[in-house]
Image: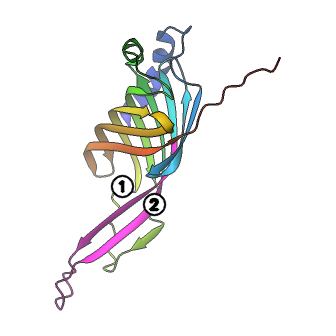
Amino acid sequence: MKSLLIFCMLLPGICQAQDSTRFYTQKSVWRVLFLPLGVTNEARLGPKTTLVSTVALGSYFGARKDLTNTTTNTPDTYYGIYAGLSVAGRYFYNFERRLERGKSIRANSGNYLTVKATYNTPTLVRKDPVQSTEINNAEGASVQVMWGFQRTYRKNFYLNLGLGLGARRNYVGPSSDFAIGYTFPNRQFVPVR
């Protein structure tokens, strides 16, 4: 939580410290995610910074043996589906280098550093034969600090991968973010003469 507060305090300085005459980031990029299932919007804050808002469905699944039932050796399977809401600030650091090498920065394709705050709802759909009290360890609020990259390829195929550290209730350790989806084309307004 302290990392998020520090990032929020430094964000205006990062946005203004850049050359304000040239924007590398697009004003608004909408995406539909297939993995995980959801919708995301990336809005420009500055020349190299964006704010990413996401609503998605998450899931968990597994198998375990019911120790109270000694008549069967078959493990019981369990699964659950929950909703997740997240907000992240991203700083892209390699736009110039990508342009120099002739690579695209379309739809904010580049490498970034991010601080992400997430809230996962309690389980919406659940199957648990043993009725354990706590399976979904991702439930509640969390904060992640990550390095990542995102690309929008031809035909608007979207890929995002982030790796770093995260903290949530009773857990501090490695964290990751992975998404595959479709980036909606940015339709520019062209005045009619």
Residues at marks 2 and 1 touching, judged by CB atoms closer than 8 Å: yes
| Rendered view: 143 above or below 187 | below
Question: Image check: 77 left or right of 125?
Answer: left
| Rendered view: 35 above or below 62 | above
Is residue 2 shown in magenta? Answer: no
Where residue 93 sits, quadrant-wise, is top left
* Picture disc at residue 47: none
Residue type for callout 2? Tyr
Q: Quadrant of the N terminus?
A: top left
How far from the left and from the top, in percent, is residue 173?
24, 44
Of residues 7 and 56, the one nearer the viewer is 56
Please say whether residue 85 is visible from this viewpoint: yes
Give, as a single range, the part of the protein colored magenta.
Answer: 54-83
How far from the left and from the top, in percent, is residue 34?
47, 51
Residue type for callout 1? Ala
Of residues 81 and 143, the one nearer the viewer is 81
Q: Main SS of the magenta segment?
A: strand
Of residues 120 and 163, the one nearer the viewer is 163
SS class, disc 2: strand
| Rendered view: 14 above or below 50 | above
Residue at the image point whose x is 59% and y is 25% from the top: 27
- How many residues crowd mark 2 within 10 Å: few (<14), some (14–19), many (20+)? some
Which of pointers 2 and 1 indicates the residue nearer the eye? 2
Task: Count up the numbered dots.
Answer: 2
* Picture disc at residue 82: 2
Q: Residue furthest bottom?
A: 71
How far from the left and from the top, in percent, is residue 12?
50, 19
The residue that disc 1 covers is 138
